[in-house]
Amino acid sequence: MNIEQIKFDKNGLIPTIIQDYYTKEVLTLAYMNRESLEITLKDKRTCFYSRSRQELWLKGETSGNYQNVVSVKYDCDADALLVEVKKEGPACHTGSESCFFNSLFEAENYSNFSPEKLYNLIKDRKVNPEEKSYTSYLFEKGLDKILKKVGEECTEVIIGAKNNDNDELRYEIADLYYHTLVLMIEQGLTIQDIKEELAKRHIIDHKVKQEKMGGEK
């Protein structure tokens, strides 16, 4: 399909959903006209049309939060676009990873959980602190407080394992995981950073070799 078959509305615009390539989280809804779509396809970075300013705008041009395009798809009627991106920073002007962080309703559904969603929620508490939020409190107290909590949770994980109590162990590992994410955000690390580090190590075999080497000394 070529661009001639895309159905722009009467104002020459098409709604465009931006989705994170790694997490599949919806980042924002914006609009493109023919020119901004052509620029997006050519430069492989999202370019939109601002309805309020009535002008083109390249995402990240002023903030540095560029969105590198992985794919551009259209729906069955060819009147809406879905763009997958690898983002270089928050998608929202508020500093949130996604523009969709306000909730009218959300059913309790554990299957919707993902580490990325938790990471983004924690990061939002750093960018947009809330008075009664424990997460915001940790960021306010700073690195030493966060490190203290990580250390405490490490000890609790060990105790849970020594007690041979899987319910306790599961609870404490979850606490450790949460506080580790807080630490990562405080230090500017992402989940993708950790994934890439693990991938390049081939960690399973590598760790076995390290243990064997240690035993031979």
Image: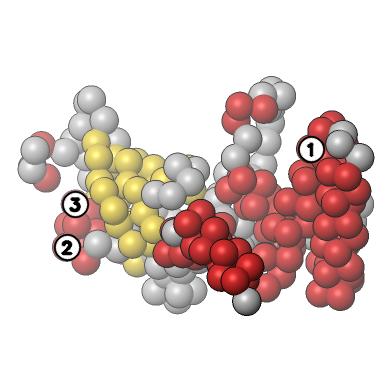
- Point out residue 120 in the picture as x, y percentages from the top left corner: 63, 52
Picture quadrant of residue 208: bottom right
Q: For the residue marked with disc 3, what is the amino acid?
A: Arg
In primary-sequence order, the first of circles 1 and 3 is 3
Judge the density around disc 2: few (<14), some (14-19), many (≥20) Cα neighbours within 10 Å.
few
Residues tagged 1 and 3 counted as in contact (Cβ below 8 A)? no
**Distance in Å between CA atoms under marks 3 and 2:** 12 Å
Identify the disc placed on residue 42.
Answer: 2
Relative vertical location of residue 38 with respect to residue 160 in this rendering, above or below: below
Q: Which residue is mark 1?
A: 170
Q: For the residue marked with disc 2, what is the amino acid?
A: Lys
Q: For the residue marked with disc 1, what is the amino acid?
A: Arg
| Residue 46 visible in the current orientation | yes
Relative vertical location of residue 52 with respect to residue 117 in this rendering, above or below: below
Residue placed at 24% from the left, 36% from the top? Answer: 74
Q: Foreground: 169 or 140?
A: 169
Residue placed at 55% from the left, 51% from the top? Answer: 98
Q: Quadrant of the C terminus?
A: bottom right
Relative vertical location of residue 94 with respect to residue 27 in this rendering, above or below: below
Q: Which residue is mark 3?
A: 34
| In this view, the mark in front (3 or 2) | 2
Q: Under tag 2, what secondary structure? A: helix
**Distance in Å between CA atoms under marks 1 and 3:** 52 Å
- Point out residue 202 in the picture as x, y percentages from the top left corner: 44, 59
Judge the density around disc 3: few (<14), some (14-19), many (≥20) Cα neighbours within 10 Å.
some
Q: Under tag 1, what secondary structure? A: helix
| In this view, the mark in front (2 or 1) | 1
Picture quadrant of residue 69: bottom left
In primary-sequence order, the first of circles 3 and 2 is 3
